[in-house]
Amino acid sequence: MKLNPFHGLPNPREVWAWGMFDLANQSFTLLIITLLFSVYVTRVVVPQPVIEPAIQEQIERDMLEVMRLRRLVRQVRVLRTPEGIRIDLVDDADFSMFHLSSTVLTPDARQLLGIIADAVGEQRGQLVVRGH
C-alpha cells in the first residue's frame, strides 16, 4: 500500500499548491522580520552614536606624556563591542586602583581616570560606568 497524505482530500493539487505557498510565505516573513527589519531599526530608526575610533590612541598618548603612568598603558584595554566601546581597567600585581582595604583611589588611578574621562568626554551618546 502506497502512503499518500493527500488521499481523500478534495483536490490534491490545490492542497499541494497551498502548502508550497505557505512554506514560501513563512520563509519570506521570517527573513524580513528577523534579519532585514532588525537591521533597518538599528541603522535607520534608532541609529547608534558614532564613536571616535581614535580613543585608544588618545588615551595611550596622554598616558605616555605622564612619566608615572607610562607603566600603566597595558592596564587599559579598549574593546569594540556591539553596544559601543568598552574600556577595561585591569589590576595586576604591580598596580592596584585602590589603597589596600579601602575604597579610596590611588593618585595614579585618579590621574588615569582623568585621562580616560578627557578622551570620552567629547563623545556623543550614552556613557555607562560599571565596576565592582
Image (cartoon, rainbow, N blue to C red):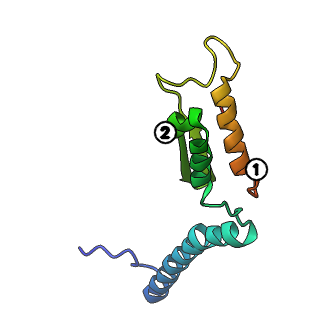
Q: Are marks 1 and 2 in contact (CB under 8 Å)?
A: no
Amino acid type of the residue that numbered disc 1 sits on in the rendered structure: Gly
Find numbered disc 2 in the image and state the secondary structure of the residue it sits on. helix
Quarter of the image for residue 123 reads bottom right
Give the residue at x 60% y 60%: 53
Please state the horizontal and vertical placement of residue 127, each as a whole percent of the image.
Answer: 73, 47
The residue nearer to you, when weighing 48 against 23, is 48
Q: Residues within 10 Å of mark 2 (few under 14, many from 20)?
A: few
Give the residue at x 57% y 52%: 56
Question: Furthest-top residue in view?
Answer: 101
Q: In the shown orientation, is residue 6 left or right of residue 66? A: left
In the rendered image, which residue does mark 2 sit on? 74
Quarter of the image for residue 67 reads top right
Q: Is residue 32 above or below residue 75?
A: below
Q: In the shown orientation, is residue 25 left or right of residue 48? A: left
Amino acid type of the residue that numbered disc 2 sits on in the rendered structure: Arg
The reply to whether residue 4 is in sight is: yes
Q: CA distance from mark 1 to mark 2?
A: 22 Å
Please state the horizontal and vertical placement of residue 125, each as a whole percent of the image.
Answer: 75, 56
Q: Is residue 75 above or below residue 25?
A: above
Give the residue at x 52% y 83%: 21
Q: Is residue 112 above or below residue 51?
A: above
The C terminus - image quarter = top right
> Which numbered dot is residue 52?
none
Give the residue at x 25% y 75%: 2
Q: Residues within 10 Å of mark 1 (few under 14, many from 20)?
A: few
The residue nearer to you, when weighing 84 against 37, is 84
In the rendered image, which residue does mark 1 sit on? 121
